[in-house]
Amino acid sequence: MFRLPLAVFGTLLALSAITLTPAKAQEDLPPPLELPQDTLPGAMTGERLGELIKRIDPNSVMRGNSHVLMVNGRALNVIYDENADRMRIITAIVAVEGIPPELLMRTLQANFDAVLDARYAIGNGQVWSVFVHPLSTLTDQDFLSGMAQTAVAAQTFGTTFTSGVFVFGGGDSGNLHEDLLKQLENASRGDDRGI
């Protein structure tokens, strides 16, 4: 005979009571809050993102909903989807083939405590540095920080494994991130062209 533990039985009973309770009439519910995209304070759009990228790297290349720009000699690919409200910054680091298991383990450990907003990922046979953020709530500062973290995480792969921000557990890459972030901020204001 199959017996449910008392706690599980109680939970199932409570859930069944919830589903058996008549739902509140639809007309009693307030309408969902819907704000047009352009009325949100600081809402990022694909167009605004493209303008920011052109200020950072005037030689950046746009293909559909993606931009390729150079930051510290590294090609970063910025991909966005306004319908899905997502933005991603990626850069390939190295082919996965031949990487020792210990290095892959260290990469996962870094995802936990050192790369913070950026992440290491594997796709299409490559190790990538990746930063993902909702597009509409992305601020200029979030974007600049995400670019810096993505580039620094790629540069430090195999050594300190850090994005340079608040490295929990130590590391010597914080200055790399700060220097790059200052350069990106200057470029975004038009003070410098290219990184």
Image (cartoon, rainbow, N blue to C red):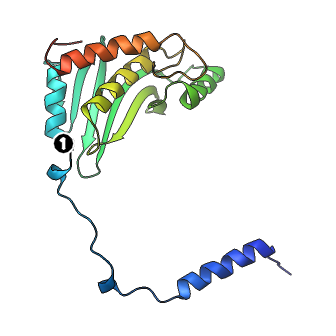
Q: x%, y% of residue 139?
A: 27, 36
Residue at x-position 43% and y-position 33% = 124
Query: Which residue occupies the extreme right position in the image?
Result: 1
Mark 1 nearby-residue class (10 Å; few <14, some 14–19, many ≥20):
many
Q: Nearer the viewer, residue 59 or 30?
A: 30
In the image, what residue occupies the spot 54% across and 24% down? 114
Q: Quadrant of the N terminus?
A: bottom right
Picture layout, residue 194 above or below residue 88: above
Left or right for 8, reference 159? right
Tell me which amino acid carries mark 1. Answer: Thr
SS at badge 1: loop
Say if residue 112 shows up in the picture.
yes
Residue in view at x 23 percent, y 48 percent: 82
The answer to which image quadrant residue 51 occupies is top left
Examine the rendering and report whether any part of residue 63 can be seen: no
Q: Residue at x 43, y 10 (%)?
A: 175
Decide: is 174 above or below 117: above
Vertical order, 162 against 9 (above or below): above
Image quarter in which the C terminus is found: top left
Image quadrant where residue 190 sits: top left
x and y percentages locating residue 85 in the rendered image: 28, 48
Label total for image: 1
Please give the residue where the numbered disc 1 appears in the rendered image.
45
Quadrant hosting residue 112 = top right
Q: Position of residue 87 (x, y in %)?
A: 30, 39
